[in-house]
């Protein structure tokens, strides 16, 4: 607990900004949902033929997984706050529309008849009878929508919208439980706080309804335009896209800032979105992977690391000792892949999947076949070996390679659990025996898994063989895991820009970029 409190104190400024972003996303989306949802709920009580269609439609939206909904919005709206607010607005619609409809419909028919008998018009009945009686039910829907939005807003960090999800996904990527808790606990407390406050208001809603309408109108007129202006239209500055993992790790952004004296505004997002965001001019540069196929596909330029900040790292299979003891042939089989890939080949394979949309399994088999490996055997049935992988192209391809060689050079059936979000999930799954093997990078092992001290890092330097030997020995001793022989290519981070803009600005190296940013 002491360490966690120290982490909170050390990161209090960033935590404060993330909390404000989280509240902003939630409230803006909620206001829009109220403004659209309330009239929509009222309309379908007047035009009954529309009720099933409208309620069915907003119900279907609620069933769409939040990540899938964000994915649908990205091609239309790009990254950042705009698609996040639209997604949260859509999720908030169902409880508001449904409760508005139900609250009005549940008003006793005899009360409505009495109002008609007094000569009231339909509009007067709605405003003076039905809505006042339905307010508690309507407000319950708003309360539900608020709590839903607080939870879903954590996922918006994956598309560069900010909020408390940034700490959560950084922690998952960096195997840092304190970081996960720093995002998850405030998000949970926010949901409880909003639920508590709205619950108190709901108990006195009949007397508070008029002040609430006035306050809501003022907030809508003042807060939303200010938030929109600050978060959705700010395009004046050079923006750098980063993964959650790179933001915090010791060989990541903190060191890059210090080495090259750069500190542009940054946007965190899922690694799969970085290249698309750069291509679509939502960011001006990204820190990606040197072997990514989208560098070629999207006409991007890797800036020269002229101060040699990014060290070279091996990629190798990481396997449980228990699995090796039970199936010793697996180690020998995977070691057949030693030095089978170089950087150009890995980039080409990634390109085939990312740009040509070929299946990772097909790309992996074709490559292995070209290299003289047997690839004909494809087993079915209950797997005895489970291969994991992270959620980016290269890992899907490598996992398929591992599966293919194991099944073709043994009698073992292999299953896949790929697309895992971040190092922590992969590593924990390996430790817990949920997977047996996954492709990992010695740099990630050094900084994220082992959390190597600065003194040891200094001694190791940037020699990738020394790093591999250290990581191999330490993981065996500490976790009973074995690093098999490296696959061959060097996967390292790279700072990447659009080729056209880099040429226009005469930027060839990271130092050139640093000089440009200092002049901006």
Image (cartoon, helix red, strand yellow):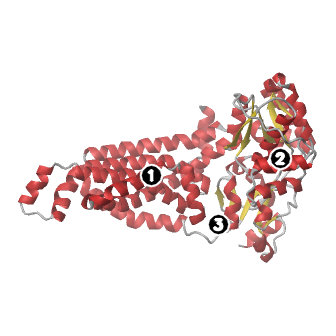
Residue at figure coordinates x 44%, y 59% from the top left: 28
Mark 3 and mark 2 in contact? Answer it, CB < 8 Å: no
Question: Which element is circle 1 on?
Answer: helix
Identify the disc placed on residue 60.
1
10 Å neighbourhood of mark 3: few (<14), some, or many (≥20)? Answer: many
Question: Which element is circle 3 on?
Answer: loop
**Nearest to viewer (mark 3 / mark 2):** 2
Residue at figure coordinates x 38%, y 43% from the top left: 195
10 Å neighbourhood of mark 2: few (<14), some, or many (≥20)? Answer: many
- Relative image position of residue 50 (x, y in whole percent): 32, 60
Residue at figure coordinates x 90%, y 36% from the top left: 335
Mark 1 and mark 2 in contact? Answer it, CB < 8 Å: no
Q: Residue furthest left?
A: 118
**Image quarter in which the N terminus is found:** top right
First of labels 3, 1 by sequence position: 1
- Relative image position of residue 174 (x, y in whole percent): 70, 42
**Image quarter in which the C terminus is found:** bottom right
Question: Which element is circle 2 on?
Answer: helix
- Relative image position of residue 199 (x, y in whole percent): 33, 43
Q: Which residue is mark 2?
A: 365
Q: Is residue 440 left or right of residue 169?
A: right
Q: Which residue is mark 3?
A: 282
Nearest the viewer among 496 and 361 is 361
Q: Label 3 to label 2, Cα distance in Å?
A: 36 Å
Q: Is residue 69 left or right of residue 198?
A: right
Quadrant in which residue 123 is drawn: bottom left
Q: Is residue 314 left or right of residue 428?
A: right
């Amino acid at each position: 607990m002491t360490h966690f409190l120290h982490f909170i104190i050390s990161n209090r400024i960033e935590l404060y900004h993330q909390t404000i972003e989280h509240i902003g996303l939630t409230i803006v989306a909620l206001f829009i949902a109220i403004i659209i949802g309330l009239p929509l709920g009222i309309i379908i009580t007047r035009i009954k033929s529309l009720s099933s269609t409208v309620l069915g439609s907003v119900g279907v939206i609620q069933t769409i997984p939040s990540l899938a909904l964000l994915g649908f919005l990205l091609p239309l709206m790009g990254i950042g706050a705009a698609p996040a607010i639209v997604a949260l607005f859509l999720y908030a619609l169902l409880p508001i529309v449904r409760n508005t409809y139900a609250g009005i419909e549940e008003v006793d028919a005899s009360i409505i008849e009495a109002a008609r008998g007094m000569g009231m018009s339909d509009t007067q009945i709605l405003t003076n009878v039905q809505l006042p009686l339905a307010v508690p039910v309507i407000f319950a829907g708003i309360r539900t929508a608020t709590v839903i939005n607080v939870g879903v807003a954590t996922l918006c960090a994956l598309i560069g919208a900010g909020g408390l999800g940034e700490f959560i996904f950084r922690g998952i990527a960096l195997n840092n439980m304190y970081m996960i808790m720093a995002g998850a606990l405030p998000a949970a407390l926010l949901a409880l706080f909003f639920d508590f406050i709205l619950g108190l208001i709901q108990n006195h809603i009949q007397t508070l309804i008029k002040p609430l309408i006035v306050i809501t109108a003022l907030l809508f007129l003042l807060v939303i335009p200010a938030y929109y202006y600050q978060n959705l239209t700010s395009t004046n500055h050079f923006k750098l896209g980063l993964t959650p993992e790179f933001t915090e790790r010791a060989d990541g952004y903190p060191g890059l800032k210090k080495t090259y004296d750069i500190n542009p505004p940054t946007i965190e997002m899922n690694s799969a979105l970085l290249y698309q965001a750069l291509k679509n001019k939502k960011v001006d540069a990204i820190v990606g992977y040197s072997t990514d196929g989208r560098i070629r596909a999207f006409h991007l330029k890797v800036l020269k690391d002229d101060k040699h900040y990014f060290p070279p790292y091996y990629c190798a299979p990481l396997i449980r000792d228990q699995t090796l003891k039970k199936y010793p042939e697996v180690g020998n089989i995977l070691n057949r892949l030693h030095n089978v890939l170089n950087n150009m080949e890995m980039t080409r394979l990634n390109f085939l999947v990312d740009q040509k949309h070929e299946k990772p399994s097909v790309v992996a088999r074709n490559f292995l076949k070209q290299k003289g490996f047997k690839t004909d055997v494809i087993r079915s049935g209950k797997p005895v070996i489970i291969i994991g992988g992270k959620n980016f192209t290269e890992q899907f391809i490598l996992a398929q390679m591992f599966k293919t060689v194991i099944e073709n050079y043994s009698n073992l059936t292999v299953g896949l659990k790929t697309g895992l979000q971040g190092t922590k999930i992969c590593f924990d799954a390996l430790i817990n025996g949920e997977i047996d093997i996954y492709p990992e990078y010695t740099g990630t092992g050094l900084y994220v898994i082992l959390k190597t001290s600065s003194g040891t890092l200094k001694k190791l330097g940037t020699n990738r063989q020394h790093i591999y030997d250290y990581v191999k020995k330490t993981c065996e001793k500490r976790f009973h895991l074995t690093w098999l022989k490296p696959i061959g290519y060097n996967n390292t981070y790279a700072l990447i820009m659009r080729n056209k803009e880099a040429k226009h600005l005469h930027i060839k190296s990271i130092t050139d970029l640093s000089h440009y940013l200092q002049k901006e």
